[in-house]
Amino acid sequence: MFRVSPIEHLEGEISFPGDKSISHRMVILSSLAEGDSYAENFLISDDSLRTIEAFRKMGIEIREERNRLRITGRGLNGLKPPSEPLYMGGSGTSARLILGVLAGQKFRAVLSGDASLSRRPMRRVTLPLREMGAKIEGPADADFLPLTIEGSDLKPIEYKMPVASAQVKSAILLAGLYAWGETKVIEPMISRDHTERLLKLFGGEVKKDGLTNTISGRQRLKGIELCIPGDISSAANFIVLALLVKKSRLLIQRVGLNPTRTGILNVLKRMGARIEVVIKGGEDTEPYGDIEVRNSSLKGTLIEREEIPRLIDELPLLMVCGCFADGVTWIEGGGELRVKETDRINSMVTNLRRLGAEIEVEGDKVVIKGGSLLRGNRVSSFSDHRTAMSMLVIGSLIPGETILDEVNCINKSFPEFFSILTKIANR
Ligand code: S3P
């Protein structure tokens, strides 16, 4: 159990551990590249460690050296058959992206995960990968882990994705590296483009034409050096705190500002947030810069379906903001939240109601009426890191004591959460 009380004041300059999505992709692409790659500010968390472990089991040397990770790639065809199942823990990104890589290998591998990951849908990737020629077996016609996958010579496909998911897009692009010819992935909406950007950095080529991404197979990738920008999804917790705690000012340095990830900043600005963003570099690779946040009065807004992929992981925090905004906040098209580590519409709505919020759900639409009188109460993480952090944020904003059942799940993405909070918050 973890008890939270209100914060009186928040001030400071902080930076964040590396972006989770980029950290996973650095391990994957470095392993498939030729030669050494170096990742500075790599995120060490439960999820990213699952990706590291999986590639170590496939014969890749990955070492921590002087505050950076060195990954010695063995080329596209250099992976070795793992002698035991590749355990993905609770990491959906590891599982889905690694399936894309395994689809192109000449060996058979088994992918397993914890109870939560074993309930999350995998058919969204196994279906197109089967279409490319991979043999995949598993529960419910390969919709759930554990999965056995045996790669082959893949054939290129043109795939129109039914859901907006960067994980699905990335899995197909990675498999496309092994196909003979051009693979096309068409997204319904723009989602995070880290795989495409990094592939280019590694010397590969992905053509983008609107929502269509084209990759040709059998490209050679070369090792790179990258300083991974801070994780904007982790920073978002502190952005929201600084906005809503009186007299606060926070400077966040060297945080990722990839436009496919900054949807939360656009929405918050629309709500009246005093946020200043300065891009400092990385325009051709992964953009990063500084964000200055001052406490602000927020007003309700409409978050539209098209915006969702650019802020999917920040929706729990935006629901928290909605509770403090003047007027109503609508979130449309949040259905993908139901297949995260937990059903995040259910976890957030249940918790926020316990704290006194007025919040309604209609299918994949959430409507929050701001300005209710909130008070601390018992809430649950639902074993989900983002629900847990959102509860710690709101618990720091409202009178009374908020008691969260557990906080271990936060290690999935952001083990430094508490040390950063202690550094900048006065209770
Ligand atoms: C991620 C994509 C998103 C996101 C997840 C990380 C990625 O999932 O929620 O935390 O690194 O590609 P979907 O692609 O399923 O939307």
Image (cartoon, helix red, strand yellow):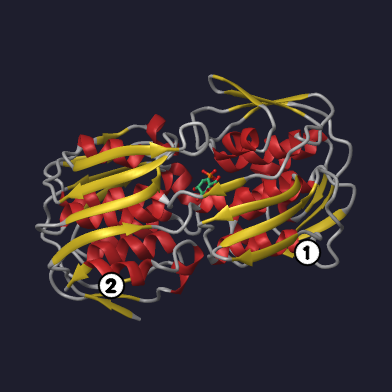
Q: Mark 1 or mark 2: which comes first in sequence?
A: 1
The label on residue 57 is 1
**Where residue 110 appears, x then y in whole percent?**
79, 59
Q: Secondary structure at mark 1?
A: helix
**Where residue 36 appears, x then y in whole percent?**
72, 51
Quadrant of the rendered structure where residue 195 is? top right
Q: Secondary structure at mark 2?
A: helix
Residue that badge 2 annotates: 422
Residue nearer the viewer, 132 or 287: 287
Q: Residue at x 22, y 37 (%)?
A: 269
Residue type highlighted by circle 2: Thr
Confirm whether residue 112 shows in the render.
no
Whether 100 is drawn above or below 60: the answer is above
Q: Residue at x 19, y 39 (%)?
A: 271
Quadrant location, the N terminus? bottom left
The label on residue 315 is none
**Where residue 420 appears, x then y in whole percent?**
33, 67
Say few, some or many: other residues with alpha carbon within 10 Å of mark 1 (under 14 / 14 to 19 / 20 or more).
Answer: some
Whether 374 is drawn above or below 192: the answer is below
Residue nearer the viewer, 28 or 332: 28
Confirm whether residue 32 shows in the render.
yes
Q: Residue furthest bottom?
A: 1
Q: Residue furthest front?
A: 66
Residue 300 relative to residue 265: left or right: left
Is the shortest distance between ligand 1 and the CB of mark 1 under 8 Å?
Answer: no
Q: Residue at x 79, y 44 (%)?
A: 103
Residue 211 relative to residue 2: left or right: right
